[in-house]
Image (cartoon, helix red, strand yellow):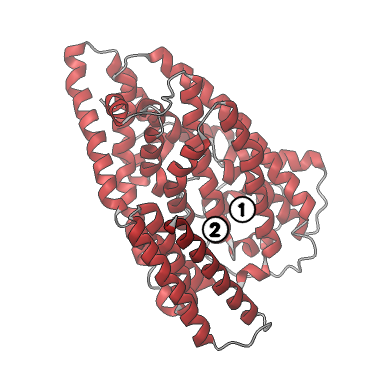
Amino acid sequence: MRNSRFVILLLLSLAIALGLSLFAEYNYLSISPRVLMSIRWAVIALLVFYAYRKRSLTTWILVSMAIGAEIGYDFPAFAQNLNVLSKIFLKLVKTIIAPLLFGTLVVGIAGHSNLKQVGSMGIKALIYFEVVTTLALFIGLAAINLSKAGEGIQLKAPVSNEIKKPAPQTVSDIILHIFPENIAKSVAEGDVLQIVVFSILFGIALAMLSESKRRPMLDFAESLSETMFKFTNIIMLFAPIAVGAAIAYTVGHMGFGILVNLFKLLATLYVSLVAFILLVLLPVAYFFRIPIKKFAAAVAEPVSIAFATTSSEAALPRAMEAMESIGVPRKIIAFVMPMGYSFNLDGTTLYLSLASIFVAQAAGIDMPWGQQLLMVFTLMLTSKGVAGVPRASLVILLGTAASFNLPIEPIFIILGIDELMDMARTAVNVTGNCLASAVIARWEGEFIDNPTPEQVLVEEV
């Protein structure tokens, strides 16, 4: 009871501090900036005290986001130097991805020697991915046509070297990119889909060997995956600092004022992403009998990491552990979740459909529905494999704009707030892929309701 009262007091204090700051920002109240800063830091001190009592990594991550936003607002010059901390975290996480995927996929496939189930899971996962991403596409398309956020913008041609026009890609190029020519190169470049393809083929080949020849490599892969999960636990202790630094950098170099400039576009994206969660993901979770509360609690930490770092890769190891904790077998997680990083980009697909029509609206081009659908389906095809890379969707957007003879100036307008948009779409990508692993587990009849620690341990072994 005391704890719930403290949480209510904390939320009220936070709301008051934010309200006073906003009223002062728009000259509705006359309050000294020093007084406002003192109030905000007093509330942050309460947040830190709550996190200390809670002793939860997820709570510390959320509190560190608030601290980072405040540092970025109060000390923007200093905050822009903190980006190195988030980059260290991202580099460390990227070292986990390849060995973790290899180990878990090989154990999941060769350890059970059920190649028929691997094919079954693959087909079911692709069907699910296609249905869900298509729904995301249409929600984004409907949202931008309703809000018309791009209309009335006066275009100017800014000069920017941050993004470059990509080389045009054919369907053959996209298909060829799925398959690795050099696994060391795929690991070095962090190409998740190529690592997954190699690991699946390696696991199938290993499953075809006799027990005496298969066992040593299987033991190695199992030991490797367990070691990488422990490695993840060590790195995640640094997550609150890295997340706070990422938020501080974003606010410090962009400021909160950018929200005013393109609020309509931001609101369109955020509302449409919430609509996608409520109208698509939530009904899917109910239909497949996924425990909503447990699922939400489990994904809170990986989603907050994805939101702050704008990288799905950064959240992958923790997301895999979170799904295992609610009853999804590791062999299914290891197969479905990495596959979803290339084929189940719910947030990115929705964003690209929305952003492409925004570009046309800003350019004053009236696109018929047929052409709109052709454009967004093209985007859905060319966007495969970009979820783990921050800002990569802008590159895809540039290539598509060139293909449909649209001007690139509106894309540079989007660039100004792309990090704020990337936070939301990456968080939805991670949420969607976590749910996909639970759905496929239920579909395969292997979801463990109310798993005990002993059941999870057996599943690991």
Residues 14 and 367: in front is: 14
The image quarter in which residue 328 lies: top left
Q: Which mark is residue 398?
A: 1
Query: Is 236 drawn above or below residue 27 in the view shown?
Result: above
Residues 356 and 242: in front is: 242
Please state the horizontal and vertical placement of residue 294, each as a whole percent of the image.
46, 38
In the rendered view, does 51 fall on the left or right side of 235? right
**Which residue lies at the image location 38% right of the left edge and 37% below the top edge?**
320
User: What residue is pinned by disc 2?
Assistant: 164
Of marks 2 and 1, which one's residue comes earlier in the chain? 2
Measure how far apart labels 2 and 1 are at the Cα level. 8 Å
The amino acid on which the numbered mark 2 sits, given as a three-letter code, is Lys
**Which residue lies at the image location 73% right of the left edge and 49% below the top edge?**
143
The amino acid on which the numbered mark 1 sits, given as a three-letter code, is Leu
Where does the N terminus fall, quadrant-wise? bottom left
**Which residue lies at the image location 53% right of the left edge and 60% below the top edge?**
419
